[in-house]
Amino acid sequence: MTFDYFFTVLTFSNIFIVLALSLNVVMGYAGQVSLGHAAFFGIGAYTSAMLAAKFGWGYFPTLLMSILIGAFFGFLLGLPSLRVKHDFLVLTTIGLNFVVVAVFKYIDFFGGPYGIIGVPRPTFFGIELGTGGYALYTGIWAIIVILLMMCIEKIYLRYGFEAIKENEDAAESIGVSVPRFKIYAFTISGALAGLAGNLWTYQMGMVFPDDFSFSVSISILTMVVLGGVGTISGPVVGALIITFLPEILRPIQNYRLLIYGIIIVLVMLYQPGGLLGKNGILRNMFKR
């Protein structure tokens, strides 16, 4: 394994850590199941790609816009979550994923099936980041997001999320604004997914509609469920496993979705809280 190859895989793991933690805000903290999270990932990625390749924007403005537009669409998805719950919310998020991919694929303004190419690597003080430098840069963002999650766990937001996760009616009865906290969760989640999309775009130098298909949403879900829903370390470990596992199993990569499905079933049966969740095997191991 060459250094460039290792740094490339490490970059992807950092991006997926950000992405898994973004889903964990909605699913782990607020208890709202989303099976279309790749939509926000794609929105952030396409925002950066279009602004950079088509309009010549610099890196930091595209980064800011990816975060803001991701947050905006997270806010928009939060609105129907006030009316639909559980299975209906799941269907809504799945539908959103297919709609977003269809928009990217069939509208020429977004590049159609050929996507958008020609996104340059970001430069800092006139220096273009190489493979190792970009791996370090994405790693810094992963650490920042982890620290943000730690802050959320220490402030009132987490208590509001926990309340609506356990029982929305009971939360309302004690004065917790369920609509407000749902909107908070989806907005934060969308912003972080937009950030991940920006990091992805500048790593790949191009974007294509199928990069954000429903199967990607399942991969993100697998990371969170495998590691431990509602924890910080769980999605991080889950993202690392799901990123590096395909490299180990590359000869059978065509069976990736089958493997993910088997992993989810086994975790649900034998480790329902995830490897680092409540009673998780890795969590118990670290306690010893």
Image (cartoon, helix red, strand yellow):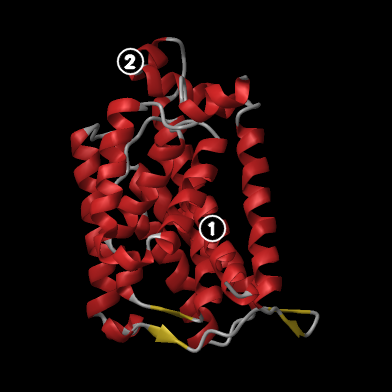
Quadrant assignment for the C terminus: top right
Kind of element beneath mark 1: helix
Earlier residue among tags 1 and 2: 1
Residue 138 location (% of width, % of height): 63, 62
Q: Which mark is residue 169?
A: 2
174, 284: nearer the viewer: 284
- Identity, as a three-letter code, of the amino acid under mark 1: Ser
Residue 194 position within the rendered picture, expressed as x and y whole percent measured from the top left:
49, 60
**Rendered location of residue 25, percent (x, y):** 48, 38
Image-based side of 27 in relation to 68, left or right: left
Amino acid type of the residue that numbered disc 2 sits on in the rendered structure: Asp
Residue drawn where x is 68% and y is 41% of the image: 147
Numbered circles on residues, count:
2
Q: Residue at x 24, y 32 (%)?
A: 86
In the figure, is residue 167 to the left or right of 190?
left
Q: Quadrant location of residue 139?
A: bottom right
Cβ–Cβ under 8 Å for marks 1 and 2: no
In the rendered image, is residue 36 in sight? Answer: no
Q: Residue at x 26, y 72 (%)?
A: 103
Pick the front one: 50 or 199: 199
Residue lying farthest to the right in this orientation: 125
Quick one: label 2, few (<14), some, or many (20+) residues within 10 Å? few
Secondary structure category for the residue under label 2:
helix
Which one is in front in this view, the residue at disc 1 or the one at disc 2? 1
Q: Is residue 203 above or below residue 174?
A: below
Q: Disc number at residue 13?
A: 1
Query: In front: 11, or 172?
Result: 11
Res 121 label: none
Q: Is residue 217 visible?
A: yes
Image quadrant for the N terminus?
A: bottom right
Q: Quadrant of residue 249?
A: bottom left
Image position of 5 with respect to 220: above or below: below
